[in-house]
Protein backbone atom coordinates (compact mmCIF):
# COMPACT_ATOMS: atom_id res chain seq x y z
CA UNK A 1 0.00 0.00 0.00
CA UNK A 2 1.36 3.41 -0.95
CA UNK A 3 1.70 5.30 2.28
CA UNK A 4 1.38 8.59 0.50
CA UNK A 5 -2.28 8.08 -0.32
CA UNK A 6 -4.94 9.53 1.94
CA UNK A 7 -6.60 6.54 3.58
CA UNK A 8 -10.40 6.21 3.99
CA UNK A 9 -10.34 6.93 7.72
CA UNK A 10 -8.47 10.17 7.11
CA UNK A 11 -4.95 8.86 7.69
CA UNK A 12 -1.92 11.15 7.47
CA UNK A 13 -0.28 11.92 4.12
CA UNK A 14 3.49 11.91 3.97
CA UNK A 15 3.99 12.89 0.40
CA UNK A 16 2.67 16.41 0.21
CA UNK A 17 5.94 18.22 0.75
CA UNK A 18 9.64 17.63 0.65
CA UNK A 19 9.93 18.69 4.28
CA UNK A 20 8.13 15.57 5.53
CA UNK A 21 9.54 12.11 6.25
CA UNK A 22 7.37 9.04 6.11
CA UNK A 23 7.37 6.68 9.12
CA UNK A 24 9.72 4.33 7.27
CA UNK A 25 12.21 7.10 6.65
CA UNK A 26 11.47 8.07 3.04
CA UNK A 27 11.00 11.49 1.48
CA UNK A 28 8.29 10.77 -1.08
CA UNK A 29 8.62 14.00 -3.02
CA UNK A 30 12.21 13.13 -3.90
CA UNK A 31 11.16 9.64 -4.98
CA UNK A 32 8.40 11.11 -7.14
CA UNK A 33 10.96 13.43 -8.72
CA UNK A 34 13.04 10.38 -9.63
CA UNK A 35 9.93 8.87 -11.25
CA UNK A 36 9.79 11.93 -13.49
CA UNK A 37 13.28 11.05 -14.66
CA UNK A 38 12.28 7.49 -15.36
CA UNK A 39 9.50 8.70 -17.65
CA UNK A 40 12.00 10.47 -19.86
CA UNK A 41 13.91 8.86 -22.70
CA UNK A 42 17.34 7.41 -22.07
CA UNK A 43 20.68 9.19 -21.80
CA UNK A 44 24.00 7.44 -21.26
CA UNK A 45 27.54 8.53 -20.56
CA UNK A 46 30.65 6.34 -20.74
CA UNK A 47 34.21 7.11 -19.75
CA UNK A 48 37.04 5.48 -21.67
CA UNK A 49 40.81 5.57 -21.78
CA UNK A 50 41.12 9.00 -23.35
CA UNK A 51 37.76 10.75 -23.01
CA UNK A 52 34.02 10.67 -22.30
CA UNK A 53 31.17 10.02 -24.75
CA UNK A 54 27.49 10.96 -24.25
CA UNK A 55 24.55 9.48 -26.12
CA UNK A 56 20.93 10.62 -25.81
CA UNK A 57 17.81 9.01 -27.28
CA UNK A 58 15.85 12.15 -28.11
CA UNK A 59 12.25 11.18 -28.86
CA UNK A 60 10.68 13.24 -31.62
CA UNK A 61 7.12 13.90 -30.57
CA UNK A 62 6.01 15.71 -33.69
CA UNK A 63 7.09 15.94 -37.32
CA UNK A 64 6.70 19.69 -37.04
CA UNK A 65 9.73 20.03 -34.76
CA UNK A 66 12.81 21.56 -36.33
CA UNK A 67 15.61 19.01 -36.51
CA UNK A 68 18.08 19.42 -33.70
CA UNK A 69 15.72 21.39 -31.44
CA UNK A 70 15.20 20.60 -27.75
CA UNK A 71 18.81 19.61 -27.28
CA UNK A 72 19.51 17.44 -24.29
CA UNK A 73 23.28 17.80 -24.23
CA UNK A 74 24.67 21.09 -22.93
CA UNK A 75 28.07 22.70 -22.74
CA UNK A 76 28.81 23.85 -19.22
CA UNK A 77 32.33 25.14 -19.74
CA UNK A 78 34.73 24.58 -22.58
CA UNK A 79 35.87 21.28 -21.10
CA UNK A 80 32.60 20.04 -19.50
CA UNK A 81 29.54 18.48 -21.10
CA UNK A 82 26.17 17.68 -19.51
CA UNK A 83 23.59 15.15 -20.71
CA UNK A 84 20.15 15.25 -19.05
CA UNK A 85 17.02 13.18 -18.52
CA UNK A 86 13.73 14.23 -16.94
CA UNK A 87 11.91 17.54 -17.04
CA UNK A 88 13.78 19.50 -19.68
CA UNK A 89 12.94 22.90 -18.22
CA UNK A 90 14.40 21.89 -14.86
CA UNK A 91 17.48 20.59 -16.62
CA UNK A 92 18.00 23.83 -18.54
CA UNK A 93 17.79 25.81 -15.32
CA UNK A 94 20.39 23.54 -13.70
CA UNK A 95 22.68 23.85 -16.69
CA UNK A 96 22.67 27.61 -16.08
CA UNK A 97 23.56 26.98 -12.43
CA UNK A 98 26.41 24.72 -13.48
CA UNK A 99 27.64 27.31 -15.99
CA UNK A 100 27.66 30.00 -13.34
CA UNK A 101 29.57 27.79 -10.91
CA UNK A 102 32.19 26.97 -13.54
CA UNK A 103 32.46 30.62 -14.57
CA UNK A 104 32.82 31.91 -11.00
CA UNK A 105 35.44 29.29 -10.26
CA UNK A 106 37.46 30.33 -13.28
CA UNK A 107 37.12 33.99 -12.32
CA UNK A 108 38.25 33.38 -8.74
CA UNK A 109 40.93 30.78 -9.21
CA UNK A 110 42.22 31.30 -12.73
CA UNK A 111 41.78 27.75 -14.12
CA UNK A 112 39.24 25.11 -15.23
CA UNK A 113 36.94 23.84 -12.53
CA UNK A 114 37.73 20.23 -11.54
CA UNK A 115 34.70 18.07 -12.44
CA UNK A 116 34.40 16.49 -9.00
CA UNK A 117 34.11 19.93 -7.45
CA UNK A 118 31.57 21.12 -10.03
CA UNK A 119 29.36 18.08 -9.59
CA UNK A 120 29.49 18.49 -5.79
CA UNK A 121 28.53 22.15 -6.05
CA UNK A 122 25.59 21.49 -8.39
CA UNK A 123 24.53 18.47 -6.32
CA UNK A 124 24.50 20.70 -3.23
CA UNK A 125 22.19 23.10 -5.10
CA UNK A 126 19.86 20.26 -6.16
CA UNK A 127 19.85 18.94 -2.60
CA UNK A 128 18.79 22.33 -1.22
CA UNK A 129 15.52 22.02 -3.13
CA UNK A 130 14.73 18.77 -1.28
CA UNK A 131 14.69 20.45 2.12
CA UNK A 132 11.76 22.88 1.99
CA UNK A 133 8.02 22.66 1.49
CA UNK A 134 7.95 25.96 -0.38
CA UNK A 135 9.74 24.51 -3.40
CA UNK A 136 9.68 21.22 -5.27
CA UNK A 137 12.72 19.07 -6.04
CA UNK A 138 14.25 19.23 -9.52
CA UNK A 139 12.71 16.59 -11.76
CA UNK A 140 15.85 15.72 -13.67
CA UNK A 141 19.08 13.75 -13.45
CA UNK A 142 22.15 14.66 -15.37
CA UNK A 143 25.51 13.26 -16.30
CA UNK A 144 28.60 15.49 -16.33
CA UNK A 145 31.75 14.62 -18.20
CA UNK A 146 35.10 16.28 -18.81
CA UNK A 147 38.62 15.65 -19.97
CA UNK A 148 41.77 17.19 -18.57
CA UNK A 149 45.39 16.59 -19.50
CA UNK A 150 46.54 15.91 -15.95
CA UNK A 151 43.48 14.23 -14.42
CA UNK A 152 42.27 12.44 -17.53
CA UNK A 153 38.59 11.74 -18.31
CA UNK A 154 35.99 12.13 -15.52
CA UNK A 155 32.30 11.20 -15.37
CA UNK A 156 29.81 12.14 -12.63
CA UNK A 157 26.06 11.72 -12.29
CA UNK A 158 23.68 13.82 -10.15
CA UNK A 159 20.14 12.72 -9.31
CA UNK A 160 17.15 14.64 -7.85
CA UNK A 161 18.08 13.70 -4.29
CA UNK A 162 21.29 15.70 -4.62
CA UNK A 163 23.81 12.84 -4.60
CA UNK A 164 26.73 12.82 -6.99
CA UNK A 165 28.81 9.75 -7.77
CA UNK A 166 31.73 9.17 -10.13
CA UNK A 167 31.30 6.49 -12.78
CA UNK A 168 32.99 4.65 -15.62
CA UNK A 169 29.58 4.30 -17.26
CA UNK A 170 26.04 5.30 -16.29
CA UNK A 171 22.54 5.54 -17.71
CA UNK A 172 19.45 7.56 -16.80
CA UNK A 173 15.89 7.56 -18.10
CA UNK A 174 13.32 4.93 -19.01
CA UNK A 175 15.63 2.24 -20.35
CA UNK A 176 18.42 2.73 -17.86
CA UNK A 177 18.40 -0.89 -16.67
CA UNK A 178 18.69 -2.28 -20.19
CA UNK A 179 21.36 0.32 -21.00
CA UNK A 180 23.35 -0.51 -17.87
CA UNK A 181 23.35 -4.18 -18.84
CA UNK A 182 24.78 -3.29 -22.23
CA UNK A 183 27.32 -0.88 -20.75
CA UNK A 184 28.58 -3.53 -18.34
CA UNK A 185 29.47 -5.74 -21.29
CA UNK A 186 31.97 -3.15 -22.54
CA UNK A 187 35.65 -3.02 -21.63
CA UNK A 188 35.62 0.76 -21.63
CA UNK A 189 38.91 1.23 -19.81
CA UNK A 190 40.74 -0.14 -22.85
CA UNK A 191 38.75 1.68 -25.52
CA UNK A 192 39.41 4.98 -27.25
CA UNK A 193 36.75 7.63 -27.91
CA UNK A 194 36.50 6.71 -31.60
CA UNK A 195 35.71 3.08 -30.75
CA UNK A 196 33.39 4.08 -27.93
CA UNK A 197 31.25 6.45 -30.04
CA UNK A 198 30.08 3.52 -32.15
CA UNK A 199 29.27 1.41 -29.08
CA UNK A 200 27.31 4.27 -27.49
CA UNK A 201 25.23 4.68 -30.64
CA UNK A 202 24.63 0.94 -30.69
CA UNK A 203 23.42 0.90 -27.08
CA UNK A 204 20.95 3.72 -27.70
CA UNK A 205 19.58 1.89 -30.73
CA UNK A 206 19.32 -1.34 -28.72
CA UNK A 207 17.37 0.17 -25.81
CA UNK A 208 15.07 2.23 -28.01
CA UNK A 209 11.58 0.76 -27.95
CA UNK A 210 10.30 0.71 -31.55
CA UNK A 211 6.77 -0.16 -30.50
CA UNK A 212 6.04 2.37 -27.78
CA UNK A 213 8.14 5.29 -29.08
CA UNK A 214 8.41 5.98 -32.75
CA UNK A 215 10.87 8.39 -34.23
CA UNK A 216 13.95 9.43 -32.37
CA UNK A 217 17.06 11.51 -32.97
CA UNK A 218 20.38 10.32 -31.65
CA UNK A 219 22.37 13.08 -29.95
CA UNK A 220 26.06 12.22 -29.61
CA UNK A 221 28.80 14.28 -28.02
CA UNK A 222 32.30 13.72 -26.75
CA UNK A 223 35.20 15.31 -24.94
CA UNK A 224 38.69 13.91 -24.80
CA UNK A 225 42.11 13.82 -26.35
CA UNK A 226 40.46 13.55 -29.75
CA UNK A 227 38.91 17.00 -29.26
CA UNK A 228 41.84 18.47 -27.34
CA UNK A 229 39.85 18.71 -24.16
CA UNK A 230 36.94 20.62 -25.71
CA UNK A 231 33.39 19.24 -25.30
CA UNK A 232 31.49 19.27 -28.57
CA UNK A 233 28.84 17.42 -30.57
CA UNK A 234 30.35 14.60 -32.55
CA UNK A 235 31.19 15.65 -36.17
CA UNK A 236 28.79 14.63 -38.92
CA UNK A 237 31.01 11.94 -40.50
CA UNK A 238 31.76 10.25 -37.16
CA UNK A 239 28.07 10.33 -36.26
CA UNK A 240 26.99 8.80 -39.54
CA UNK A 241 29.60 6.06 -39.16
CA UNK A 242 28.42 5.37 -35.61
CA UNK A 243 24.74 5.24 -36.60
CA UNK A 244 25.51 2.94 -39.51
CA UNK A 245 27.43 0.62 -37.16
CA UNK A 246 24.50 0.69 -34.74
CA UNK A 247 21.88 -0.09 -37.38
CA UNK A 248 24.03 -2.84 -38.94
CA UNK A 249 24.61 -4.50 -35.54
CA UNK A 250 20.87 -4.54 -34.87
CA UNK A 251 20.15 -6.10 -38.25
CA UNK A 252 22.75 -8.79 -37.57
CA UNK A 253 21.06 -9.68 -34.32
CA UNK A 254 17.68 -9.78 -36.02
CA UNK A 255 19.12 -12.06 -38.74
CA UNK A 256 20.72 -14.41 -36.20
CA UNK A 257 17.36 -14.66 -34.41
CA UNK A 258 15.68 -15.72 -37.66
CA UNK A 259 18.30 -18.40 -38.25
CA UNK A 260 17.69 -19.89 -34.84
CA UNK A 261 14.04 -20.20 -35.67
CA UNK B 1 74.07 72.22 16.44
CA UNK B 2 71.18 70.12 17.54
CA UNK B 3 67.97 70.51 15.60
CA UNK B 4 64.75 69.21 16.96
CA UNK B 5 62.86 67.00 14.59
CA UNK B 6 59.31 68.32 14.19
CA UNK B 7 58.14 65.22 12.38
CA UNK B 8 57.23 62.25 14.54
CA UNK B 9 58.24 58.96 13.03
CA UNK B 10 54.66 57.72 13.14
CA UNK B 11 53.51 60.29 10.62
CA UNK B 12 55.30 58.52 7.79
CA UNK B 13 53.69 55.41 6.38
CA UNK B 14 55.32 52.14 7.30
CA UNK B 15 56.68 50.73 4.07
CA UNK B 16 58.61 47.62 3.38
CA UNK B 17 60.99 49.51 1.10
CA UNK B 18 62.32 46.25 -0.02
CA UNK B 19 64.09 43.91 -2.29
CA UNK B 20 62.21 40.76 -3.22
CA UNK B 21 62.97 38.12 -5.81
CA UNK B 22 61.58 34.76 -6.96
CA UNK B 23 63.17 32.36 -9.47
CA UNK B 24 61.89 29.14 -11.10
CA UNK B 25 64.11 26.08 -11.46
CA UNK B 26 63.30 22.64 -12.82
CA UNK B 27 61.27 21.13 -10.00
CA UNK B 28 60.61 24.17 -7.83
CA UNK B 29 61.18 27.81 -6.96
CA UNK B 30 63.42 29.90 -4.73
CA UNK B 31 62.11 33.09 -3.09
CA UNK B 32 64.30 35.67 -1.40
CA UNK B 33 63.87 38.95 0.47
CA UNK B 34 65.65 41.41 2.70
CA UNK B 35 64.34 42.23 6.20
CA UNK B 36 64.15 46.01 6.59
CA UNK B 37 60.87 47.82 7.42
CA UNK B 38 61.13 51.59 7.39
CA UNK B 39 58.83 54.46 8.43
CA UNK B 40 60.35 57.47 6.73
CA UNK B 41 63.99 57.45 7.81
CA UNK B 42 63.54 55.15 10.80
CA UNK B 43 64.07 51.44 10.60
CA UNK B 44 61.05 50.12 12.46
CA UNK B 45 61.93 46.44 12.13
CA UNK B 46 65.30 45.15 10.97
CA UNK B 47 64.48 41.45 10.99
CA UNK B 48 61.06 41.16 9.32
CA UNK B 49 60.43 38.04 7.25
CA UNK B 50 58.78 39.27 4.06
CA UNK B 51 58.25 35.78 2.67
CA UNK B 52 54.75 34.87 3.71
CA UNK B 53 53.14 31.45 3.56
CA UNK B 54 49.99 31.18 1.42
CA UNK B 55 49.86 27.38 1.48
CA UNK B 56 52.18 24.41 2.16
CA UNK B 57 54.00 24.80 -1.13
CA UNK B 58 53.04 28.34 -2.14
CA UNK B 59 54.67 31.45 -0.71
CA UNK B 60 54.50 35.12 -1.57
CA UNK B 61 57.03 37.92 -1.24
CA UNK B 62 55.72 41.21 0.16
CA UNK B 63 56.65 44.74 -0.89
CA UNK B 64 55.13 48.22 -0.75
CA UNK B 65 52.95 49.17 2.20
CA UNK B 66 53.59 46.68 5.01
CA UNK B 67 49.99 46.65 6.26
CA UNK B 68 48.47 46.30 2.80
CA UNK B 69 50.80 43.51 1.77
CA UNK B 70 50.38 41.55 5.00
CA UNK B 71 46.62 41.85 4.91
CA UNK B 72 46.41 40.62 1.34
CA UNK B 73 48.63 37.67 2.21
CA UNK B 74 46.50 36.76 5.23
CA UNK B 75 43.27 36.97 3.26
CA UNK B 76 44.62 34.77 0.48
CA UNK B 77 46.02 32.31 3.00
CA UNK B 78 42.52 31.90 4.44
CA UNK B 79 40.88 31.62 1.02
CA UNK B 80 43.38 28.98 -0.08
CA UNK B 81 42.79 26.95 3.08
CA UNK B 82 39.07 26.80 2.32
CA UNK B 83 39.66 26.20 -1.39
CA UNK B 84 42.07 23.31 -0.89
CA UNK B 85 39.60 21.55 1.43
CA UNK B 86 36.76 22.09 -1.07
CA UNK B 87 38.62 20.62 -4.02
CA UNK B 88 40.27 17.95 -1.91
CA UNK B 89 43.84 18.53 -3.07
CA UNK B 90 46.69 21.05 -2.93
CA UNK B 91 45.83 24.28 -4.74
CA UNK B 92 47.53 25.35 -7.95
CA UNK B 93 50.04 28.21 -7.82
CA UNK B 94 47.91 29.90 -10.49
CA UNK B 95 44.92 29.83 -8.11
CA UNK B 96 46.90 31.55 -5.36
CA UNK B 97 48.18 34.15 -7.79
CA UNK B 98 44.68 34.75 -9.19
CA UNK B 99 43.30 35.29 -5.68
CA UNK B 100 46.05 37.84 -4.95
CA UNK B 101 45.47 39.49 -8.32
CA UNK B 102 41.71 39.77 -7.75
CA UNK B 103 42.22 41.66 -4.49
CA UNK B 104 45.03 43.82 -5.87
CA UNK B 105 42.99 44.78 -8.92
CA UNK B 106 39.66 45.40 -7.20
CA UNK B 107 41.21 47.69 -4.60
CA UNK B 108 44.02 49.06 -6.68
CA UNK B 109 43.14 52.69 -5.86
CA UNK B 110 43.31 52.04 -2.13
CA UNK B 111 46.15 49.58 -1.87
CA UNK B 112 49.83 50.04 -2.44
CA UNK B 113 51.40 46.63 -2.38
CA UNK B 114 53.09 44.31 -4.82
CA UNK B 115 53.18 40.61 -4.10
CA UNK B 116 55.22 38.09 -6.05
CA UNK B 117 53.58 34.65 -5.74
CA UNK B 118 55.71 31.55 -6.23
CA UNK B 119 55.37 27.87 -5.43
CA UNK B 120 55.18 24.28 -6.63
CA UNK B 121 52.17 22.23 -7.77
CA UNK B 122 51.93 18.81 -9.40
CA UNK B 123 50.68 20.08 -12.75
CA UNK B 124 53.07 22.92 -13.57
CA UNK B 125 56.04 22.28 -11.28
CA UNK B 126 57.76 25.43 -10.03
CA UNK B 127 56.01 28.65 -11.08
CA UNK B 128 56.55 32.38 -10.41
CA UNK B 129 53.69 34.88 -10.87
CA UNK B 130 53.84 38.68 -10.82
CA UNK B 131 50.76 40.56 -9.55
CA UNK B 132 51.82 44.22 -9.64
CA UNK B 133 48.83 46.61 -9.68
CA UNK B 134 46.42 43.80 -10.45
CA UNK B 135 48.01 42.21 -13.51
CA UNK B 136 48.77 38.50 -13.57
CA UNK B 137 51.80 37.27 -15.44
CA UNK B 138 53.91 34.14 -15.18
CA UNK B 139 57.65 34.70 -15.52
CA UNK B 140 60.79 32.56 -15.13
CA UNK B 141 61.97 35.02 -12.48
CA UNK B 142 60.79 38.31 -10.98
CA UNK B 143 62.20 41.08 -8.79
CA UNK B 144 60.31 43.73 -6.88
CA UNK B 145 60.48 46.46 -4.26
CA UNK B 146 62.54 49.62 -4.14
CA UNK B 147 65.81 47.71 -4.21
CA UNK B 148 64.96 45.95 -7.44
CA UNK B 149 65.77 49.02 -9.51
CA UNK B 150 69.45 48.67 -8.60
CA UNK B 151 69.70 45.03 -9.65
CA UNK B 152 67.73 44.79 -12.92
CA UNK B 153 70.98 44.85 -14.85
CA UNK B 154 72.50 42.16 -12.66
CA UNK B 155 69.58 39.75 -12.88
CA UNK B 156 69.14 40.24 -16.62
CA UNK B 157 72.81 39.50 -17.20
CA UNK B 158 73.24 36.65 -14.74
CA UNK B 159 69.98 34.69 -15.12
CA UNK B 160 70.27 31.51 -17.15
CA UNK B 161 67.58 29.05 -18.10
CA UNK B 162 67.83 25.60 -16.54
CA UNK B 163 69.73 26.52 -13.38
CA UNK B 164 69.91 23.93 -10.63
CA UNK B 165 68.39 24.44 -7.19
CA UNK B 166 71.74 25.39 -5.65
CA UNK B 167 72.55 27.79 -8.52
CA UNK B 168 69.18 29.49 -8.02
CA UNK B 169 69.75 29.85 -4.30
CA UNK B 170 73.16 31.45 -4.93
CA UNK B 171 71.67 33.71 -7.62
CA UNK B 172 68.97 34.90 -5.22
CA UNK B 173 71.39 35.53 -2.35
CA UNK B 174 73.75 37.49 -4.60
CA UNK B 175 70.91 39.65 -5.93
CA UNK B 176 69.59 40.49 -2.48
CA UNK B 177 73.02 41.24 -1.20
CA UNK B 178 73.79 43.65 -4.03
CA UNK B 179 70.45 45.42 -3.68
CA UNK B 180 70.83 45.76 0.08
CA UNK B 181 74.20 47.41 -0.32
CA UNK B 182 72.87 50.12 -2.66
CA UNK B 183 69.24 50.69 -1.59
CA UNK B 184 68.79 52.64 1.62
CA UNK B 185 65.38 51.08 2.18
CA UNK B 186 66.69 47.51 2.02
CA UNK B 187 68.93 45.84 4.54
CA UNK B 188 69.24 43.57 7.53
CA UNK B 189 69.36 39.84 6.91
CA UNK B 190 68.38 37.81 3.87
CA UNK B 191 65.50 35.31 4.05
CA UNK B 192 65.35 32.44 1.59
CA UNK B 193 62.56 29.93 0.94
CA UNK B 194 63.10 26.96 -1.38
CA UNK B 195 59.97 25.08 -2.48
CA UNK B 196 59.87 21.77 -4.34
CA UNK B 197 57.81 18.58 -4.45
CA UNK B 198 58.90 17.61 -0.95
CA UNK B 199 57.91 20.88 0.69
CA UNK B 200 59.17 24.32 1.66
CA UNK B 201 62.48 25.00 3.38
CA UNK B 202 63.05 28.36 5.08
CA UNK B 203 66.51 29.77 5.67
CA UNK B 204 67.91 32.96 7.15
CA UNK B 205 71.32 34.29 6.18
CA UNK B 206 72.78 36.74 8.65
CA UNK B 207 74.40 39.99 7.59
CA UNK B 208 77.97 38.88 8.08
CA UNK B 209 77.41 35.67 6.11
CA UNK B 210 76.13 37.43 2.99
CA UNK B 211 78.37 37.45 -0.09
CA UNK B 212 80.46 40.60 -0.52
CA UNK B 213 81.24 42.41 -3.71
CA UNK B 214 83.36 45.35 -4.86
CA UNK B 215 84.01 47.87 -2.12
CA UNK B 216 82.76 45.73 0.74
Image: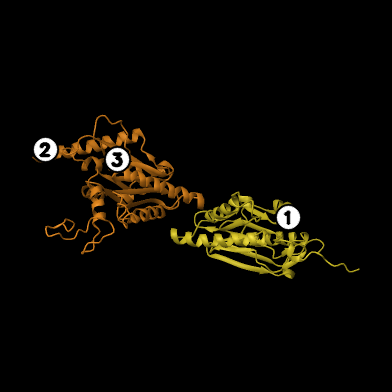
Chain colours: A orange, B yellow
Q: In which quarter of the image is the C terminus of chain A?
A: top left
Q: Which residue is drawn at 25% across and 44% down?
A: A42
Image position, residue A194 (x, y; %): 34, 41
**Against B106, is B51 above or below?**
below
Camera-side mark, 3 or 1: 1
Residue A258 shows which numbered tag?
2
Above/below status of B5 relative to A180: below
Residue nearer the viewer, A130 or B187:
A130
Mark 2 touches mark 1? (CB < 8 Å)? no
- Specify which label sits upstream in the sequence, 3 or 2: 3
In the structure shown, which secondary structural element does the residue marked by tag 2 occupy? helix
Q: Is B48 positioned to the left or the right of A46 in the image?
A: right
Q: In the rendering, at what x and y percent does residue A29 appear?
A: 25, 54
Residue B129's spot in the image, x, y percent? 59, 53
The chain letter for the residue carrying disc 2 is A
Viewer-closest of B31 and A132: A132
Query: At numbered mark 1, what does the secondary structure look like: helix, strand or loop?
Result: helix
Q: Are marks 3 and 1 on the same chain?
A: no
Label 3 secondary element? helix
Q: Is residue A163 left or right of residue A174?
A: right
* Parent chain of label 1: B
The picture places residue A182, in percent across and down from the top left corner, at 23, 48
Query: Looking at this view, is B119 or B214 the one in front?
Result: B119
Report the Cα–Cα distance between label 3 and label 2: 25 Å
Residue, far left: A261
- Asked if residue B122 shows in the view, the reply is yes
> Which label was assigned to residue B151?
1
Please tell me the numbered disc located at residue A198: 3
Q: Mark 3 lies on which chain?
A: A
Local crowd size for mark 2, using a 10 Å CA cut-off: few (<14), some (14–19), many (≥20):
few
Amino acid sequence: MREGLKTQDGGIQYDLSASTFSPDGRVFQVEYAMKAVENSSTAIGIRCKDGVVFGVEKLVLSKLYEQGSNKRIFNVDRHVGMAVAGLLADARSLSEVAREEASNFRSNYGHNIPLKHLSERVAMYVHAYTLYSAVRPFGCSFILGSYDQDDGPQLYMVDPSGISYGYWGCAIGKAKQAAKTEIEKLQMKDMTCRELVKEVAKIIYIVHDEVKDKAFELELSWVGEVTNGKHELVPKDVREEAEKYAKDSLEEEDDSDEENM
Amino acid sequence: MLEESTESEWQSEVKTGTTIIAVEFNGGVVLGSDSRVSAGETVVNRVMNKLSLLHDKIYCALSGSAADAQTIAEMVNYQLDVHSIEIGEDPQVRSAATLVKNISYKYKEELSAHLIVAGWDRRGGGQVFVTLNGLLSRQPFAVGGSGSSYVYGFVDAEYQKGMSKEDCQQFVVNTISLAMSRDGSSGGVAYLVTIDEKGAEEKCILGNELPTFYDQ
